[in-house]
Image (cartoon, grey):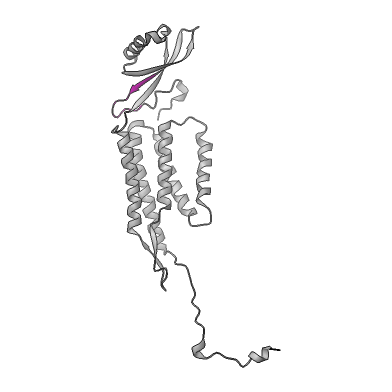
Amino acid sequence: MITAQDFGDYTLADDAIIDVQTITDAMMTTTQSITELAIRFFLNLLVCWIIVQFFYYRKSRRRDYYFTFMVFSSAMLMLLYIMGSVEVGVGLTLGLFAIFGVIRYRTETVPVREMTYLFVIIALAAMNGLAPVYKLVGATSADPHYALSGGSVGIMALSNLLVILLIWVLENGHLLKHTSTKLVLYDRIDLIVPSRRDELIADLEKRIGVKVNNVEVGHVDLLKDAAFVKVFYDLEKGQSGSIDTLTKAKDFVEQ
């Protein structure tokens, strides 16, 4: 039977000592973390400002959405960046903003253009908040550390630039015509019949001052001799039709 006494006098020779290597994960320094945050934040802020100032606000002139887009983008980037360093998943982060959006934006009808810009702002914030900026260098060496990756930063900047370029092309009508619609409460219901469509269009062009491409007749009130008519027309360069679909004074908010 082997007892502890049998090992009492056993010692290892100096050349038989087992060398145990302590493996530790590389950590970013405080300076590197601040630099990474600054790159993400100011790049995202610059790109969002360019999009909102030169593309969205130039036509819409809505200061409330200007404020919303800029603050929303910066806040989401910060939330993604902070939660990316803890155990909370990105899915939960995006879910929080989805909840915020439902609580706020379900109370009113958000125009398609504004909603599109909101999704673009969210996508840019997610991309700039999660794209790699630093890379691990010397992972198999005795001194692993993080270093700024110029290639990763360049790809992130190029991705932002491509989004700006796409919006510029579409907003300036290089690929699509800018069209809008007006909702008109029309009093000459004798012209709404299909056989007098040309007369209806000519009368609308004379009275509202736009070149009408097409018309749709909606609700008809025979008691009041009136009908709702949707007028389709092309916007001039630089014009916005954000107010065209409003029919009630309470829906108009002067910004």
The image position of residue 175, as x and y in percent, is: 30, 33
Is any part of residue 64 visible from this angle?
A: no
The image position of residue 224, as x and y in percent, is: 48, 7
Q: Main secondary structure of the magenta part?
A: loop
| Residue stretch in magenta | 231-240
The image position of residue 133, as x and y in percent, is: 38, 57
Looking at the image, residue 102 sits to the left or right of residue 155; the answer is right
Residue 229, image quadrant: top left
User: Quadrant location of the N terminus?
Assistant: bottom right
Q: Relative to residue 1, is residue 72 depicted above or below?
A: above
The image position of residue 239, as x and y in percent, is: 31, 27
**What's the residue at 40%, 41% (across, down)?**
120
Is any part of residue 18 visible from this angle?
A: yes
Q: Relative to residue 226, is residue 4 depicted above or below?
A: below
**What's the residue at 41%, 27% (across, down)?**
254
User: Which residue is more in the foreground, 90 or 176?
Assistant: 176
Give yes or no for residue 232 being in the magenta stretch. yes
Looking at the image, residue 95 sits to the left or right of residue 184; the answer is right
